């Protein structure tokens, strides 16, 4: 009876190894190293399983297939096959009996079978791995082993089938445990990501907020010259007074949508607060910046021109622009300069743009 405790001990060892691997992945792993670290850890887990051979009556050598199952299911065929390299080398170096047969049955076949159930969303944690996939993989490998034994060994006896069913239960239970552990880790990661997103996203407009804008802007300014545009929605208080705060909230959502559609692809737009938005742009040429701001003003006014409400309160934006003279400019100073330029746009009649270092020819009223 003690012989049946050996696979249970191996299964507990494998669960522990999986827990350690997940912690290593969460603390150390980056995408650039995952291609190497995942097969390395999987291969080492296979070798540890190979060091604890199962009793001969159970008809299996060890539980080396289980780490391969997880590699194929979560990472796909390339990683699964790469994960077989270390245990294959260990099997050959240790002069294991029937080495090539065992490699084909317990490493390569599981890698191929489990890879059939792979989904790329399992790898990045955006999707939980279904328990049924684990049961299907274990069942297919179980049937494959019965077929191989019947064809190439000595047929099927009731004792052999019974032992194989016991091992199927051990493998299925262990594999399901591994899947549950991975899913729990993925759910925790998704929850953390959601909380981070909520902390860095404006809940009304779904744009990034100022908290997330600042580190990105500081990082960009440390490397090169950049421009900042402060964008303010004109007549917003009057609009709120006339149509109510719910309509005002919807207007902010609509304005953010229009701006998102018409900013340059590599630029970064965030909600600064209230009815103000801030734009980090890689454009630094004054003339091109003027054309850029002019287009934003024009497209905003045009987008709301057909609204009957806009007759009473024209929906337009004013923009203040500043450009860093040198790399490593202070973000706080640039925001101050863009604010000053924005105030000048407001003072001159709104629906216009102004450079901090003014270009009078280009700082023209947009509805002229």
Image (cartoon, grey):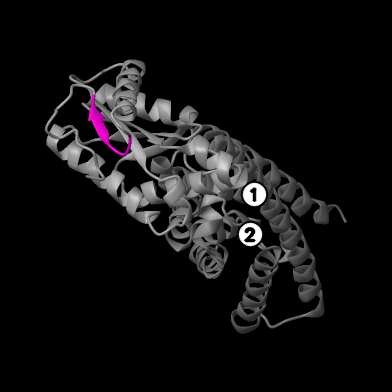
Find residue 229 and report its horizontal and vertical position in percent.
31, 32
For mark 2, give the secondary structure: loop
> Viewed as shown, does residue 302 lie left or right of 210?
left
- Mark 1 lies on residue: 182
Find residue 336 and report its horizontal and vertical position in percent.
34, 18
Q: Is 352 part of what is drawn in magenta?
A: yes
Residue 203 in sight in this render:
no
Q: Residues at badges 2 and 1 in contact (C-beta under 8 Å)?
A: yes
Residue at (63, 59) in percent of width and height: 129
> Viewed as shown, does residue 218 lie left or right of 114?
left
Residue at (57, 48) in percent of width and height: 247
- Mark 2 lies on residue: 129
Question: Which quarter of the image is occupied by the C terminus?
Answer: top left
Q: Could you give the CA–CA distance between mark 2 and mark 1, rounded to whole angstroms?
A: 8 Å
Q: Which mark is residue 171?
A: none
Splitting the image into 4 quarters, where does residue 78 fall?
bottom left
Residue at (65, 47) in percent of width and height: 187
For mark 1, give the secondary structure: helix
Residue at (48, 52) in percent of width and height: 309
Q: Is 44 part of what is drawn in magenta?
A: no
Residue 124 in sight in this render:
yes
336 or 189, nearer to the observer: 336
Q: In the rendered structure, which disc, 2 or 1, sits on the residue that comes first in sequence?
A: 2
Question: Which quarter of the image is occupied by the N terminus?
Answer: bottom right
What residue span does the magenta drawing correspond to?
350-355
Find residue 257 and report its horizontal and vertical position in percent.
43, 50
84 or 367, nearer to the observer: 367
């Amino acid at each position: 009876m003690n012989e049946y405790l050996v696979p249970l001990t191996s299964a507990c060892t494998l669960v522990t190894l999986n827990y350690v691997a997940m912690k290593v992945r969460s603390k150390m792993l980056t995408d650039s190293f995952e291609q190497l670290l995942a097969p390395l850890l999987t291969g080492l887990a296979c070798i540890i399983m190979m060091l604890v051979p199962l009793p001969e009556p159970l008809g299996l050598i060890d539980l080396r297939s289980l780490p391969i199952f997880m590699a194929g299911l979560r990472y796909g065929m390339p990683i699964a096959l790469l994960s077989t390299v270390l245990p294959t080398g260990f099997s050959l170096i240790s002069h294991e009996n029937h080495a090539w047969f065992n490699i084909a049955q317990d490493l390569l076949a599981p890698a191929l079978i489990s890879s059939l159930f792979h989904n790329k969303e399992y790898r990045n944690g955006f999707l939980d791995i279904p328990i049924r996939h684990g049961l299907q993989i274990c069942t297919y490998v179980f049937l494959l082993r019965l077929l191989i034994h019947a064809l190439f060994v000595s047929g099927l006896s009731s004792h052999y089938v019974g032992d194989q069913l016991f091992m199927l239960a051990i493998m299925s239970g262990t594999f399901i445990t591994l899947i549950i552990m991975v899913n729990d880790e993925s759910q925790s990661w998704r929850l953390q990501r959601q909380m981070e997103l909520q902390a860095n996203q404006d809940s009304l407009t779904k744009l990034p907020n100022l908290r997330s804008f600042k580190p990105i802007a500081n990082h960009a300014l440390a490397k090169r010259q950049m421009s900042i545009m402060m964008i303010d929605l004109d007549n917003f208080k009057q609009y709120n007074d006339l149509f109510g705060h719910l309509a005002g909230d919807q207007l902010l959502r609509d304005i953010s949508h229009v701006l998102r559609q018409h900013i340059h692809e590599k630029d970064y737009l965030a909600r600064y607060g209230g009815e103000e938005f801030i734009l980090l742009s890689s454009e630094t040429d004054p003339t091109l910046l003027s054309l850029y701001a002019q287009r934003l003003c024009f497209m905003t006014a045009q987008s709301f021109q057909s609204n009957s409400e806009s007759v009473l309160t024209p929906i337009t934006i004013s923009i203040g622009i500043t450009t860093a003279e040198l790399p490593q400019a202070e973000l706080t100073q640039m925001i101050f300069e863009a604010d000053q330029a924005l105030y000048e746009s407001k003072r001159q009649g709104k629906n216009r743009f102004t450079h901090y270092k003014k270009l009078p020819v280009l700082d023209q009223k947009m509805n002229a």
